[in-house]
Amino acid sequence: MKNVHSFMLSIAAVGVMMFPVVPSAASLEPIDSTGVQVQQQQQNGITYLSGGIGEDEARAIQQTQGYNLHMTFATGVENKYVPDVNLVIQKDPGQPVLTLSEAGPLVYVQLPPGKYTVIATRHGEERRDTAEVGSGAARNLVFHWGSEN
């Protein structure tokens, strides 16, 4: 039993190292809305939010509801949020449903149910992931680049 316990701790440690940036639960602290400039936007009928620069703006986005795909962009060992990511969300290969330039560091999207490929590019370095979204809980994706560049 001791070996199983040690093995499970090792797996948990690897999981933490692989996904160092985990969006925290939205803080319920009051937000100073004077510094918040995040507005709901639309492209191709897809509603989204992009922003999160500054603590109040990040909390404002994290407290929103109705978005089934949440993405966070970060870099470096400090997991510093970055707002300069080019983002493409595709329904089928080669069929983009949302294309954003200089997005982030948080992007929340309301997509029709289905499976999507998400491509995030920063300074020429591409990160890809897939997300299956539906009517259940929001899907969270974290994209991390190793250095500040």
Image: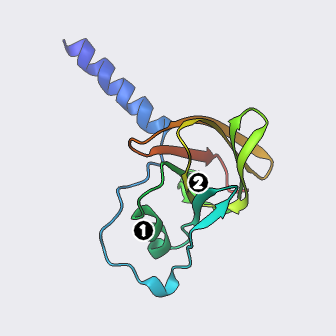
Q: Which residue carries the number 1 mark?
A: 59
Disc 2 marks which amino acid? Ala
Q: Is residue 146 left or right of residue 33?
A: right
Disc nearer the start of the sequence (1/2)? 1
Q: Mark 2: which secondary structure?
A: strand
State the mark number for residue 74. Answer: 2
Label 1 sits on what residue type?
Answer: Arg
Left or right placement of residue 82 versus residue 64 in this view: right
Instruction: Pick whichever, 63 or 97, lies toward us.
Output: 97
Residue 125 quadrant: top right
The C terminus, quarter of image: bottom right
Residue 18 on image: x %, y %: 50, 35
x 47%, y 39%: residue: 134
Residue beneath the point at 70% across and 40% down:
90
Left or right of 127 in this view: 108? left
Q: Using the image, determine if residue 40 lies above or below residue 101.
A: below
Work out how far the residue at label 1 is from the one at label 2, CA to CA, in angstroms: 16 Å
Residue 105 visible in the snapshot: no
